[in-house]
Image: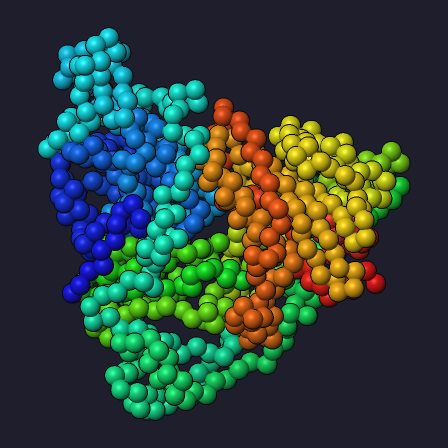
Amino acid sequence: MDRPCLDWELSGNLTELPVSRRQALQLLGGGIVILFADGDLRAQSEGEPSRATNALPTDYNAFLRIGEDGEVTCFTGKIEMGQGVVTSLAQMLADELDVALDSVHMVMGDTDLCPWDMGTWGSLSTRAFGPHLRAAGAEAKAVLLALAAERLDRPVADLAVEAGVVFDRAEPSRRVAYSTLAQGRRIARHLSPAPPLKTPAEMRVIGQPVLRRDAVAKVTGAAQYAADIRLDGMLCARLLRPPAHGARLQALDVSPVSQVSGARVVQDGELVAVLHDHPDQAERALALIEARWDRPEPTVDDQTIFTHLFRAAPPGEEVARGGDLARGESQAVEVVEATYLNSYVAHAPIEPHAALAVVEGSKTTVWASTQNPFGVRNEVAEALGCQPEDVRVITPFVGGGFGGKARNLQAVEAARLARAAGRPVQVAYTRAEEFFADSFRPAAMVRIRSGLTEAGRIAFWEYHVYYAGARGAECFYDIADHATLAYPGGWGGGPGTHPFATGAWRAPGNNTNTFARESHIDTLAAKAGVDPVAFRLAHLRDEKMRGVLLAAAERFGWTKGRLGPGRGCGVALGIDAGTWVASLAEVQVDEATGAVRVERVVCAQNMGLVVNPQGARIQMEGCITMGLGYALGEEVHFRGGEILDRNFDTYTLPRFSWLPRIETVLIEDRNDPPQGGGEPAIITMGAVVANAICAATGARLLQLPMTPARVIAARG
């Protein structure tokens, strides 16, 4: 059987796959293997390195290899889906090891070769996994220095390292390369106590702007995704899907499929698929199947969903509380109440879900577009009735996830079909399937009740969030008397709450919570007759938040309120993934049509030590662009379990013509640990645009997305 050849650096996978982990290490040849687990490093001199399974989310077991040729290979369960960790993680390892960045190669998301990982989400790769990776690099360097000291007959204190070469400070010609030290041997050595990590002043690679190492492959089309992989004898699958979520198959006639030469039908329980050598022929054959479905009568749609959700809400769970609400309300001279809504939103990644599976004896191998390869491994093992160790998941590049690629139905479907067919089977969702079978960001609501004192300060803050969860719900403003409750405590709700599956969507819940909070803060500022930037500063003690707000306002050249007919500026603040963010925007509203054009966005964020400033700015720009979608256009229309939006002709994504002038400001604190950068800048986009629209038109919009029709309606 032909095997796909995938380059390590481009795809994060080994060549000539599949091979076992032991075979892979044999293929790599001699070298120093440093294994770290539970935050400690361990060296393995013989046998197969152990791999933790089912570890806690904070346990990032990963290991690195120092090769005979001086090349460094890092194995990690994290995956690359456009966020840039294939570059930033390499920077962190290269810096601690004191090797050239180009010498570090990443092997990512292979469950046979990489240690267990919880999944790639939550902007956790750099801030949570990164410290363990740096610790591995620091100990590997210390082990190599000890070996070099023996080789050069010099104390370790007299030695230095540059670009993977250890040398005597007093006599630089006395030197030995990592490659020489590692040649032909595996060295088991553990240092206790663990060596310290580099201080910011000692860093040479961390903090430098670096071009993403996957950029060329992606813009030239050389990068491979799950749907690009081909195996000899592979069949393409097209699956029979119900017309609506909740529909049940009552009758099925597959005999017309015989009209398409080479097509075959596979039925595995409720799974019905047509397989063919060519996907278009499988699609043609699928259309010939005659199926009768029992469809439940729709009880909700995109117009009535919020009434249903309020009625179905479980008891709330307390997120934060301080002071006494009754006392605060007694001091208020004006009370402001509002309910904020947002609709269901699709992930709509560039790459639809795809997977290729092959079953050979007791071993199943799956190439999948996924954010959690070890989760796929477990799901496939359960579906096939085998042990997780008998399933190997390989993750090529992933073309966008945003939380949706944590849903792995396509991988399970491919594995079941491959077992039934006895041949490799690829499942690649069409765009219509992507909209139907994916999960959605849950529709959610926020009710806020607050008030102002006679002096224009916020007297109290009562906040109730439904189905978005607690992320971003807690108020960071200086309000003595406050209470925040979430219904339910997590996001989404239980079975039957929503008419279809819901799931995480970039910065889950925080977009909703920030939209509601920052819209309400602006309303209070207007009631108090105070500039919205000045009003926020008057209620902020948090120095990081004050810092990002002042930096953004200075770069923006803040001008209060209305700038001219239909033109205005807005501001919004938020915290996500340990990062503080402030955004200011200028918008133009067409007073006749209600169409909104965002002209300019300035975003400042404090994310601690910035590993790759260029990568951080790219992520900020991506968040701002994606945020325009949920702010102005993205909304799933449905009738019961029937999804009415099946492509981009009706589901509105941001276009290049929408893009404003984007300016990013990084307030770096090199003495603070690095924080998340893949999500924070998106959370403020709904609120900052809403506040700018209100400044321009006087219309306060309470529901996302802010479509032209809703803008017109809000203006009355």
Does residue 118 appear left or right of residue 673 in this picture? left
User: Which color scheme is applied?
Assistant: rainbow
The residue drawn where x is 79% and y is 60% is 591
Q: Nearer the viewer, residue 337 or 313?
A: 337
Viewer-proximal residue among 528 and 11: 11
Percent x, y for residue 326? 81, 41
Instruction: Name the side, left or right, on which 545 lies relative to 500.
Output: right
Q: Is residue 631 above or below residue 78?
A: below
Q: Give the residue displayed 25% in from the left and 14% down from the top.
A: 159
Judge from the rendering whether residue 282 lies leftward or rightward of residue 449; answer left or right. left
For the image, the number of numbered tags is 0
Q: Position of residue 66 (x, y in %)?
A: 21, 33
User: Can residue 583 be seen?
Assistant: yes
Residue occupying image coordinates x 41% and y 51%: 81
**Residue name at image x 43 percent, y 77 percent:** 241
| Camera-side residue of 262 and 165 | 165
Using the image, determine if residue 566 lies above or below residue 180.
Answer: below
Residue pushed farthest left?
A: 184
Residue 183 image offset from top left, x and y in percent: 12, 31
Q: Is residue 489 visible?
A: no
Q: Where's the C terminus, which quadrant?
A: bottom right
Quarter of the image with the N terminus is bottom left
The spot of residue 206 in percent (x, y) is 41, 30
